[in-house]
Image: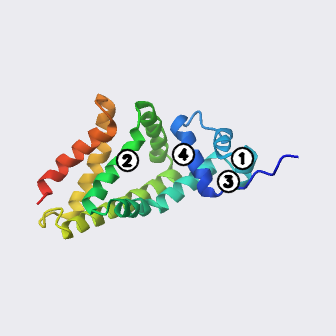
Amino acid sequence: MSPRPRKASDDEIFAAASRAMSRLGPGELTLAAIAGEAGMTAGALVQRFGSRRGLLLSMTARFAESGGDLIEQLRREHGSPLAAIRGYADCMSELASSPAVFARNLAYLQIDLTDADFRRHLVVHARVTRRGLQQLVEAAIEARELAHATEAAGLARTIEAIVSGSMMTWAFYRQGSAKRWMRKDLDAVLAPHLP
């Protein structure tokens, strides 16, 4: 008799779903694919989440709730608030680790933008992220890594816009890695604010 498979936590299932989503677009993603990645059965996922949509909505809600955790983690890892801002751009560049991965992420973003249930979580995540970026800018001003005259809320909004926009233009030109491309654009935005 084979041993009973261990019960995966929601976080482990969401991590498995993220890995599957990096390989499969929305039309290809199945509960079976997620279950295989998580080392469990599709039936177990149905019991827990009801459907693929239910699983993805639960995952999106968790992602939205933990948006500030990423900023805090970057702050701990990098020590310097300015380095954490750059780390944020590097982290976001992972969404475009290749043109195919970026295209799949855009396909999932389309769902987030057009489905009201998913969009609600997207907006929460965006607001938490913007607030976290503003706190990093404020900390960088206080640490004298950015000029005292820098307007924190405005620069945080600009960082958010440049990181997203830079990722899109990298996809157009595909010169070098997304990480290098996005870091160059971010540094151009930060340069006038350096003391």
Q: Residue at x 18, y 53 (%)?
A: 190
Q: Amino acid at mark 1?
A: Met
Q: CA distance from mark 1 to mark 3?
A: 14 Å
At a point 62% along the width and 57% down the height, the residue shown is 10
Q: Quadrant of residue 123?
A: bottom left
Secondary structure type for disc 3: helix
Q: Is residue 152 left or right of residue 24?
A: left
Q: Where is residue 91? Give x, y as percent.
A: 38, 49
CA neighbours of label 4 inside 10 A, class few (<14), some (14 to 19), many (20+): some
Query: Badge 4 is on which residue?
Result: 18
Measure the C-alpha gap from mark 4 to mark 1.
15 Å
Residue 147 on image: x %, y % = 13, 63
Q: Residues within 10 Å of mark 1 (few under 14, many from 20)?
A: some
Q: Quadrant of residue 127?
A: bottom left
- Earlier in the chain: of badge 1 and badge 3, it is 1
- Tell me where residue 31 appears, x and y as whole percent: 66, 42
Q: Are marks 4 and 3 in contact (CB under 8 Å)?
A: no
The residue positioned farthest toward the bottom in the image shown: 142
Query: If the image is split into quadrants, where does the C terminus sit?
Result: bottom left
Return the mark for residue 92.
2
Side of 15 where 51 appears, left or right: right
Asked which secondary structure carries label 4, the reply is: helix
Taking the image as shown, residue 111 lies to the left or right of residue 43, namely left
Along the polypeptide, which appears first: circle 2 or circle 1? Answer: 1
